[in-house]
Amino acid sequence: MFVTQVYGDNGKMKEYHYTGPVEHRFSPYSFNGGTVLAVAGEDFAIVASDTRLSEGYSIHSRDSPKCYKLTDTTVIGCSGFHGDCLTLTKIIDARLKMYKHSNNKCMTSGAIAAMLSTILYGRRFFPYYVYNIIGGLDEEGKGAVYSFDPVGSYQRDTYKAGGSASAMLQPLLDNQIGFKNMEGVQHLPLSQEKAVQLVKDVFISAAERDVYTGDALRICIVTKDGIKEETVPLRKD
Amino acid sequence: MALANVLQSESVDFSNYGRKCRGFSSSLYETELGLESVGGDNLSFAVRTACSDGDGPERKIQFLHGTTTLAFKFQHGVIVAVDSRATAGAYIASQTVKKVIEINPYLLGTMAGGAADCSFWERLLARQCRVYELRNKERISVAAASKLLANMVYQYKGMGLSMGTMVCGWDKTGPGLYYVDSEGNRVCGDLFAVGSGSMYAYGIVDSGLKQKDLTVEEACDLGCRAIYQATYRDAYSGGQVNLYHVHSEGWNRVSQSDVLMLHQQYQAEKA
């Protein structure tokens, strides 16, 4: 479904009365909402996303998770424009297969991240409107999180939130996982159980305050034994 | 174009979409780490969708933004100091961005402007430098490396790339420092500061560089101080100060200091 955009005077406050001719233009993008979160632990990684797919004031689906499994050790979360999310994940899957056939091994998380950066930059002048976060295990078995911007700038993090509620979640993660803005607190390493509980709590908070986040939470836990999925209900309003 | 050629071998050719559909500007905030994309913007790449709040919430794509980077030559090489903040609009996307790109063990590039633009083109530069080394059996000079980068981005002049970088290294002729940007500028110099906080950094370095014979430690301290002062006054700079020193044997990372710690340290020194 396309969205028409109205060009008024740039920079002025929007007026609610008809002021003159307006030009409507087709926009190839639309915003489908959703929040994604990834946390890296000592020997695990968690990628979680809500499952609401919205557009404007409507909800298209309550069961549209944004985490996609790439390999046995890597999961990607994509939020933004759903059309581009789908295409991007298809392209990544195809490239993974090509790599597997040429090199006879699976791509590592770091390699997938570097590849995604060039895939995104290839569309520098007509970007994929997708905010990606990759979570997985690196070659040493430690948790790794890579966060991207829509044109491919990326870096490795310990935790990152992306999507519509990212500005609300990131400070909470900074405090709870990064121990930021706290003094005299012991820096305990994050256990898997605590991380999963934190993710659930954080998404419950996001669903309270962000209209685009809610319905259900899908959590993918990546460990050396494989990927485990968990679904938790969230507010449906 | 260079971009399509580089990526073509590795993936399906999507370059046609870019050329046909450039009209859909989609109100992209330039991935700017503090550098304005000026000139050549007749292509409405930066058009805003004015009434996006009108029919339901249409969101604008936001890229990463805001910086201070500086580099200066001195007797014992080149000091490179950068902050580590990236902003997307008014949101601080990250406080731990690596804005110094290690092109090879003796060449460094800094990042200001579009984060993706800088890291992609400098990564490509690293590849070109390596090819040069293999073909010519000797290291590439800083002048040649900066020229390669300038020529690569010049092909995209006017298309909205935003990149202001300093190529720093040590070659046969001694320490080398070039400023290269997406407008096509390539300038050799002894001191450059790039980004939204550059004016504050210039103030500190200009006053500290009066003495001609700085020791390595004094120079490092000066660079660190300059970035700290820039983060103090510029809202778009902050995080940590990453400091590198390039000398005849290559570069080494001197320090990474959190700006809050530096603040407390300098306050204590004042007292």
Image (cartoon, rainbow, N blue to C red):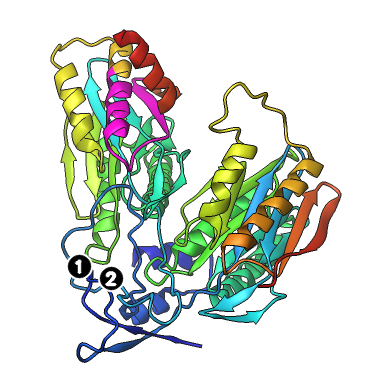
On screen, residue A24 versus residue A141, left or right, reads left
As for residue B226 lying within the magenta part, the answer is yes
Q: Chain of mark 1?
A: B
Q: Position of residue A167 (x, y in %)?
A: 51, 53
Residue closest to the eye, A209 or A174: A209
Does residue A115 appear anywhere in the picture? no
The quadrant of the rendering that contains the N terminus of chain B is bottom left
| Amino acid type shown at disc 2 | Phe
Q: Residue A114 location, x and y as percent?
A: 55, 52
Q: Is residue B152 magenta?
A: no
Crowd tier of the residue under label 2, counting other residues whose Cα lies within 10 Å: few below 14, some 14–19, many 20 or above? many
Say which quadrant the C terminus of chain B sits in: top left
Q: Residue at x 78, y 56 (%)?
A: A72
Check contact, mark 2 vs mark 1: CB within 8 A: yes
Q: Is residue A72 left or right of residue B103?
A: right
Which element is circle 1 on?
loop
Spatial CA span between label 2 and label 1 = 7 Å
Amino acid type indicated by mark 1: Asp
Q: Quadrant of residue B53?
A: bottom left
Number of callouts: 2
| Part of the protein shown in magenta | B222-249
Circle 2 residue:
B45
Asked if residue B257 can be seen in this view, the reply is yes
Q: Residue at x 26, y 86 (%)?
A: A17
Viewer-proximal residue among A137 and B68 = B68
What is the x, y in percent for residue A184?
Answer: 61, 21
| Residue that carries the numbered disc 1 in the rendered image | B41
Task: Please tell me in which quadrant of the rendered image residue B97 appears.
Answer: top left
Where in the figure is residue B5, as x and y percent of width and height?
A: 41, 66
